[in-house]
Image (tube, helix red, strand yellow):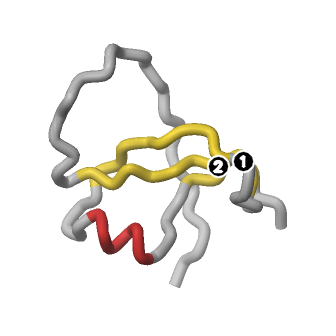
Amino acid sequence: MQLVTLMPTIHLKPVEQKKKSTRGLYLAPCYYSSIRSGSFIITVELKSGSMPSEHWIKRATALVMNLDY
């Protein structure tokens, strides 16, 4: 099992917030460091693939900007 995977560069484009369906998306929290307390930055919408978003929530899947190990 792989615990850390590199994520490709993500370019963020600010847009007006609109109500839209989050079906098929996982709202991944993005943290500055692997010590998650107090380092939350933003929520990133990622396609959840063949698994429902609950699958990723139960595994505490998150994006981390800086690995501290």
Q: Which residue is mark 2?
A: 31
- Per the rendering, the mark at residue 55 is none
Residue at figure coordinates x 24%, y 23% from the top left: 18
Judged from the image, the secondary structure of the residue bearing numbered disc 1 is loop
Q: Earlier in the sequence, mark 1 or mark 2?
A: 2
Neighbours of disc 2 within 10 Å: few (<14), some (14-19), many (20+): many
Q: Position of residue 32 (x, y in %)?
A: 71, 46
Residue 26 quadrant:
bottom left
Spatial CA span between label 1 and label 2:
5 Å
For this orientation, the residue located farthest to the right is 69
Q: Which residue is mark 1?
A: 39
Neighbours of disc 1 within 10 Å: few (<14), some (14-19), many (20+): some
Residue at figure coordinates x 40%, y 68% from the top left: 57
Q: Are marks 1 and 2 in contact (CB under 8 Å)?
A: yes
Q: Amino acid at mark 1?
A: Ser
Q: Position of residue 14 (x, y in %)?
A: 43, 16
Task: Classify 40 as above or below 2.
Answer: above
Quadrant assignment for the C terminus? bottom right
For this orientation, the residue located farthest to the bottom is 1
Q: Position of residue 61 (x, y in %)?
A: 49, 65
Q: Position of residue 4 (x, y in %)?
A: 60, 68
Task: Classify 26 as above or below 15.
Answer: below
Q: Amino acid at mark 2?
A: Tyr
Judged from the image, the secondary structure of the residue bearing numbered disc 2 is strand
Residue at figure coordinates x 31%, y 21% from the top left: 17
